[in-house]
Amino acid sequence: MSENPYQWLNKSLATIHRANWYRSVKTIDGLPGAIVQLEGKSVINFASNDYLGLAGDERLIQAAIAATKAYGTGSTGSRLLSGHRELHRELERAIASLKQTEDALVFSSGYLANLGAIASLVGQKDLILGDIYNHSSLKKGAILSGAKAIDYNHCDVEDLRSKLELHRASYRRCLITTDSVFSMDGDLCPLPKLLNLANEFECMLLIDEAHATGVMGKTGAGCVEHFNCTGGELIQIGTLSKALGSLGGYIAGSNELIDFLRNRAASWIYTTALSPADTAAALRAIAIVRQEPARRKQLQHNSNYLKQQLSECNLFPSESPIICIGLDNPQAALKKAQQLQQAGIFAPAIRPPTVPTSRIRISLMATHTIEHIDCLVAGIRH
């Protein structure tokens, strides 16, 4: 009698459990914010990507309600068929204005934006060089493209140069890919040096601004602005689901780039358009980001304060609101996360295979008070 073809799933799950890699969802009730209800208990929330505290902002909620009343709950089709609304173009123009690019294109998620861009821009005759710590969407986009994909050491410009010298001449086109803020570490890519290399070796450069949009730069435009690289020739990708408090993704760049992607990016062409509610909420969030710089200043103050308070801990280098404390193994990370939750603090353990080393990952928000941060510090020191 033949073996059940699904039997391997149980064996695989058992392996995941033994390695302390098993994951399960945690239910949060009510509005998002600095304090949330986690599985029935009130906790201070240091696990959210809602950096500016906009996901529960009444102005975004009202914008989403108004758009739903005007356009319904769903877009009903892809943008090229029945799904396009003027709201989508308003949002794209607002993103392009924030990023100081010629145009922008909105996707149903940041993950889809990366898949669509990479798979459209390069193919089997081409080369992708990506930072080894890149987000999963950048790595999966590279696989989907069929291009030759090679990792370079994390933020190591010299390693990238050596790989370009070795491989670039053998391929038609070359795409360099990187996160701007690395989501599991909090450090920044060396963007000016990457731009110089891209120009020297005639490469395209794609930067994922998911954790930088609304957070980094004088106006919240991201790391491109933070590094004074605005106007440089590159492909900027980001999300609407973090600091902008909504859902969706975007690509910003030249008119030619955006026009090309409208015609070639499968994850845009064959996906239902972003819902009216999400579109309107993101549009309102961008306006708030530009009108209320004090939110970014408070977020930076909170980040600096926490790093000062935890200076004796094993902190990862970070210039962002993502602050990580390194721990020896998955068991130690899980134990510390459980201790913090018992003390009323939600700061998750991040373990392999998501990251190479175990850690507690802390995400700060502009709406955290000093008292919230002091509670976290006490819990970590305990």
Image (spheres, rainbow, N blue to C red):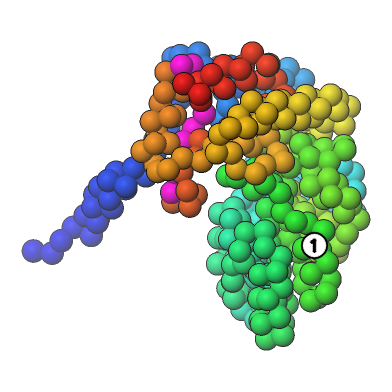
Residue carrying label 1? 193
Is there any visible trace of residue 70 in the rendered image? Answer: no
Tell me the quarter of the image containing the N terminus. bottom left
Closer to the camera in the image, 353 or 336: 336
Q: Position of residue 174 (x, y in %)?
A: 71, 74
Residue 33 on the magenta segment: no
- Identify the residue at image location x=70%, y=69%: 158
Magenta region, mostly helix, strand or loop?
loop
- Identify the residue at image location x=72%, y=54%: 189
- Identify the residue at image location x=58%, y=32%: 312
Q: In this picture, is 183 found above or below 374?
A: below
Left or right: 26 as drawn, with respect to 86: left
Residue furthest to the left: 1
Q: Residues within 10 Å of mark 1 (few under 14, many from 20)?
A: few
Left or right: 287 as drawn, with respect to 143: right
Residue furthest to the front: 312
Closer to the camera in the image, 330 or 307: 307
Quadrant location of residue 365?
top right
